[in-house]
Amino acid sequence: MDAPVEERFGRSPYLILIDTDTGTETSIQNPGADAAGGVGPRTVQLLVNHGVKAVVTGQVGGNAASALQAAGIDAYQYRAGGTVRDALALYRAGKLTRLL
């Protein structure tokens, strides 16, 4: 929770999955983070496999945006340069801009 937020959605080396109902946290490695291309849609598929309903990130590329929309996953923007904990607090407070 104290790790800095990677603002590039598909290039994030780890994804922090948070159940906002229970507060449980799970960190998963993003195996496609260093791939040459197609990282956004692969990252979306990883999120779909884990039942994610919303993401908080700095920016989303066009292919990732299309994949997120097709999957029904909401996206919110966080570009303050803080930690995962900071981003989660703003998300919970409803203070993030909705991207999708």
Image (cartoon, rainbow, N blue to C red):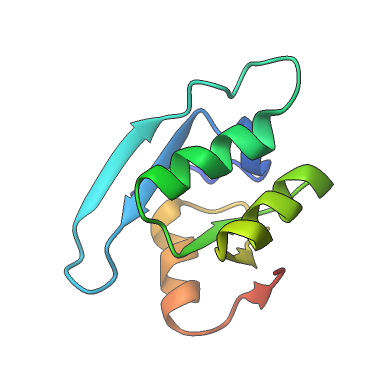
Q: Which quadrant holds the C terminus?
A: bottom right
Where residue 3 sits, quadrant-wise, is top left
Name the spot of residue 95 as percent of width and height, x first: 57, 82
**Placement of 45 over or under 68, stated as above or below:** above
Residues 23 and 70: in front is: 70
Residues 52 and 77: in front is: 52
Residues 68 and 17: in front is: 68
Can residue 2 be spotted in the picture? no
Name the spot of residue 37 as percent of width and height, x first: 76, 21
Name the spot of residue 2 as percent of width and height, x first: 36, 46
Furthest-right residue in this view: 62
Q: Is residue 69 left or right of residue 52?
A: right
**Placement of 5 over or under 11, stated as above or below:** below
Q: Residue at x 67, y 62 (%)?
A: 69
Q: Residue at x 47, y 28 (%)?
A: 30
Q: Residue at x 63, y 17 (%)?
A: 34
